[in-house]
Image (cartoon, coloured by chain):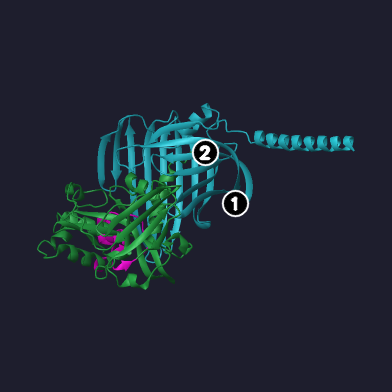
Amino acid sequence: MNRLRFIFTTFILLSAILISSDLKSLPSSSFIIAPSGISSSVYSDSRTTYKVESSDEDFTLSGTANQQILSINSGGGKTVIVVSSGESPLVENKNLNIYLSNTPYLNTDKESIKKTAMKFKDSKDPVRDVSLFVYNHISDKKMGIPLLPASSILSGKAGDCTEHSVLTVSILRTLKIPARAVMGIILSENFSGKQNVFVYHMWVEAYHNGRWILVDSTRPQDIHPNRYIALAYHNLKTETPLEYLQAISTMQNMKISYVK
Amino acid sequence: MIILKKQKVNKMKFRSFLSILIIIISVSCSSKPTQIPEGIWNYDLLINGVRAGRAVFSNTSSGDNFVLKSEMYLNMGTIENKSIQIVTETKNFKPVKLEVLNTVTDTAGNSTQEINKTATFKGDEVTLKTGDYESKFKIQGPFVLDGNYFFSELLKNKFKTGVIIKANIYEPSVEIDTPILVLVETKGVESVQVGGRSMRLLHVKQRVEKLKSMDMYLNENGVTEKIVIKMLNNIFELVRVE
């Protein structure tokens, strides 16, 4: 009873574990969602429709740079959302300044981050170049690390999708390119022996040329937006911001099925 | 024949009465806590029934203060995560200090990273240090740091079923300058499986504003025997071990 703080610690741990997708100590069911009815065409198509179900009536998803919400039906103790995944022209441009601000995790005021960002000052495609830089810089692709500040990631050169995302957002914001982190799931053709499964993941959205685009620095040259389902934004101000917690806490007994 | 039937009915009535009496006695035997528990307790951390780590919680008196310490250890492949939280509050639950020490050790690469956070409180003024960053701000309205306040309020209400206690908890890992509303509700005494044993425990539900809940099960001394959180298709459990 004295440890009411445990609920917060658990959320932090749970987020870290799921996104890190470490299979050595836990059953793979902890990290994956096996969708039903997946067609092999999903790996060649540019757009895919999925049905996402949660046994929580408050469950919701929002439109992002890679998804459009086709319908949301809540009732009878569950919510069913039909989502179309693929490149989506998300042009929302209000309050872009909030996606340029510094946070304790982004360290955009640190000399090491500023110096790194300066390398891309004259780049013709800074979003692509930053993503490639982060991919190559984090040479030790290691899972299991919780959220770390960008300057620690820059010096440590190790991490999983969360480290790739934090460093990417940090450098992009330092370059005055609005950027934000997204937590969601990605369809993997083969993940640790399991075929066609969704795995928890984190990636980035950057506002470039008048629209938001999906940036995934864990695979900058192999992005297929139709294989991503965005679940919640993460503001990178704290380990587990309340709005992020509110979103992911409604994801209960989640099921995904392929529609077309 | 009628007499025999009557005797049979009476016997059945007596058996039913006896069963009810046994249930009443067993329920009333599950007495409720009378004071805030102090001590050190060990737990296994389970994810979907598999042991993923361990935790040690303590609650001790130190002069005019309570000191609550939690240590949580989680191994993920070659990465060891250690999270230590130390809460210092006055005996009437006024926040004094919150220390969070997170250590990530890569046993393969022999590297260690520390992420420390300290919040010190002077009335409504908070000084928060996160790594190299220090910020000062004021918090509107009363807030607490942990569960002792809730326990004390539930004690005043004799852990009556249905009682709800509300208070704001300051948690900088969620919101830097805004405490979070937490509700705690007594759900009554229930039979619960703890480490393969069936125990009669007091069920207390904790809810963070707009979030899903956590179920806590306390023994007659107020010590947490089990905590369950369900989220993202996973079940997190803390189960007390000797």
Residue B97 placement (x, y as % from top left): 37, 37
Disc nearer the start of the sequence (1/2): 1
Front residue of A38/A27: it is: A38
Name the residue located 34 percent from the left edge and 44 percent from the top edge: A242
Dot 2: element: strand
Say left or right for B45 vs A91: right
* Residue type marked 1: Gly
For mark 1, what is the residue?
A: B195
> What color was chain A assigned in the picture?
green
Q: Residue at 40% of width from left, 45% of height from top?
A: A8
Q: Which quarter of the picture shows residue A216?
A: bottom left
Magenta span contains residue A157: yes
Quarter of the image with the N terminus of chain B is top right
User: Viewed as shown, does residue B226 lie left or right of B89?
Assistant: right
Q: Which chain is cyan?
A: B
Residue at (32% x, 58% y) in the render: A83
Distance (Cα) linking label 1 and label 2: 19 Å
For the magenta stretch, what is the residue range? A136-164
SS of the residue under disc 1: loop
In this figure, which residue is indicated by the disc labeled 2? B204
Residue A168 appears left or right of B179? left
Quarter residue B123 falls in: top left
The chain containing the residue under callout 2 comes to B
